[in-house]
Amino acid sequence: MKWYAATRARLGRGTRREAPMLRDRNPDHWKLLVFYFNPESPRLFVAKRTGAPATLNFARPMAWVIAATPFAVGIAGAVLSHFRVLR
């Protein structure tokens, strides 16, 4: 447990309180009612309008990487399976 506390302190975490996730209800930031896109927001994860706790801010490039990774893994698995590399 000491290692965990020391690592958090060294990385600068745990020394400040994180701001709570506020729900952004501005309709201009929500595309197709479910995709959040706000280039002015520095957050990668933002609170949804209702329901589940968070969604990605698709104005951030890392959000696209996170969203595309499961599809890329699935397609790579299908291609490799087709060529019988994976069994």
Image (spheres, rainbow, N blue to C red):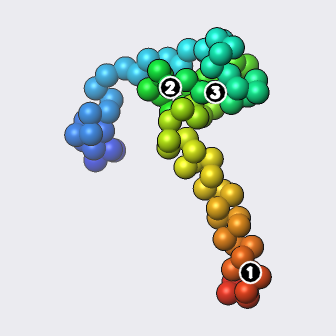
| Residue 4: x %, y % from top left | 32, 44
Look at 55% across and 23% down and name the residue there: 38
Judging by the rendered image, the residue that carries numbered circle 3 is 36
Indicate the secondary structure of the residue bearing disc 2: loop
Judging by the rendered image, the residue that carries numbered circle 1 is 81
Q: Nearer the viewer, mark 3 or mark 2?
A: 2
Q: Amino acid at mark 2?
A: Pro
Look at 74% across and 80% down and name the residue there: 81
Look at 60% across and 27% down and name the residue there: 37
Look at 60% across and 56% down and name the residue there: 69
Q: Is residue 17 above or below residue 26?
A: below
Q: Left or right: where does residue 71 sit relative to residue 15?
A: right
Task: Assess whether mark 2 and mark 3 are in contact (beta carbons under 8 angstroms).
Answer: no
Which of the 4 image quadrants contains residue 72? bottom right
Which of the 4 image quadrants contains residue 16? top left
Residue 57's tag is none
Q: Amino acid at mark 3?
A: Tyr
Judging by the rendered image, the residue that carries numbered circle 2 is 39
Q: Left or right: where does residue 78 sit relative to residue 26?
A: right
Q: Amino acid at mark 1?
A: Ser
Work out how far the residue at label 3 is from the one at label 2, CA to CA, in angstroms.
Answer: 10 Å
Indicate the secondary structure of the residue bearing disc 1: helix
Q: How many marks?
A: 3
- Nearer-N-terminus badge (1/3): 3
Q: Is residue 49 above or below residue 62?
A: above
